Image (spheres, grey):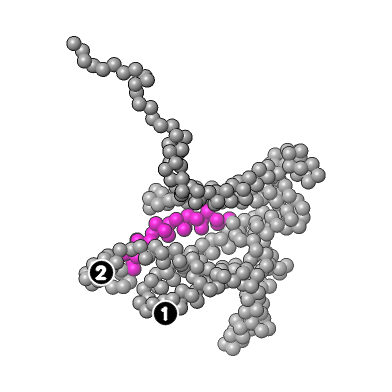
Amino acid sequence: MDNTAVYTKTDVPRRPTKWKAFKKTIQKNWDLYLLISPVIIYFFIFDYIPMYGVQIAFKNFIAAKGIWASDWIGFVHFKRFFDSYYFWRLIWNTLGISLYQLAIAFPIPLLLALLINEVGNRSFKRIVQTVTYAPHFLSTVVMVGLIFIFLSPQNGIINHLIVFFGGEPISFMTESKWFKTIYVFSGVWQGMGWSSIIYLAALSGIDPSLHEAARVDGASRLRRIWHINLPGIMPTVVILLILNVGQIMGVGFEKIYLMQNNLNIESSDVISTYVYTQGIVGAQYSFAAAVGLFNSVINVILLVTVNKIAKKVNETSLW
């Protein structure tokens, strides 16, 4: 007698659908979802809903008609931007400042965190952290005001030092060649302490027994930093690097605009300031939206590309 069981389609256990699995997860962790819901609502209202307005980049937007009633014109605004005299200047200035900032401003907080982590005196460590964190809380307007004061050709302390050592005063804020350096290094001074917090948090998670074993083996402090601390925080470094590269075309508007003048505009004119002058000042809303959309698309492409490279090379990525 054949004892083989015969199963019908109804007897086969069904896999839970994605929606049911998600619903079960929500029921199980409802308190966590409730905690994060204000953040989700915030981003949905202020970041995702306004994205419907991106369509004006492909329209001849007229405020009296509204977004939906304005005529579609396709890629006319994009072509106008690509063919304009300012296109390559904007691209090179934006990339130049971003890459300069990435090369200087990215490793310095990491170096600062490694140095602070090695300080044994807790009181001195707190003082160093407080002093380096403090500039972060200065507003951009105050920061730019300090830059103008310190670099003034007549009364600035920097020019006083230059004259003291036998040099001639330099008008830093009106010479294009100095703009990128001033922008990057002032940003380093203002943000390095605050940016080092994440690295310090990652360093605190490294097992102290690794350092004890290294000391027993005779490893110097520099060797322990190189072979224990750096590998221990490398996933954090990679994630932050990916995020920084993803913003490489998104040079901040406010600080550059405040530092900008007619004499240094050759080096200070970037995509964000161009969008402001064309869209808000010039009331060319569709054209400015097209330029901003182009900038955002490039950022997304860079983010995805670097994330894939990091995942293959270091097995660390955002997703």
SS for tag 2? Answer: helix
Which is more N-terminal, label 1 or label 2?
1
- Say which of marks 2 and 1 sits in front: 1
Looking at the image, is 224 positioned above or below residue 286? below
Looking at the image, is 269 positioned above or below residue 70? below
Q: Residue at 49% of width from left, 51% of height from top?
A: 35
Residue 33 percent coordinates (x, y): 48, 47
Q: Is residue 243 rendered magenta in the image?
A: yes
Q: Which residues are magenta?
A: 225-249
Residue 299 percent coordinates (x, y): 56, 51
Number of numbered discs on residues: 2
Q: Is residue 85 rendered magenta in the image?
A: no
| Residue for badge 1 | 124
Q: Residue at 34% of width from left, 23% of height from top?
A: 12
Q: Overall secondary structure of the magenta stretch?
A: helix
Decide: few, some or many residues near mark 1? Use Cα within 10 Å; few <14, some 14-19, many ≥20.
few
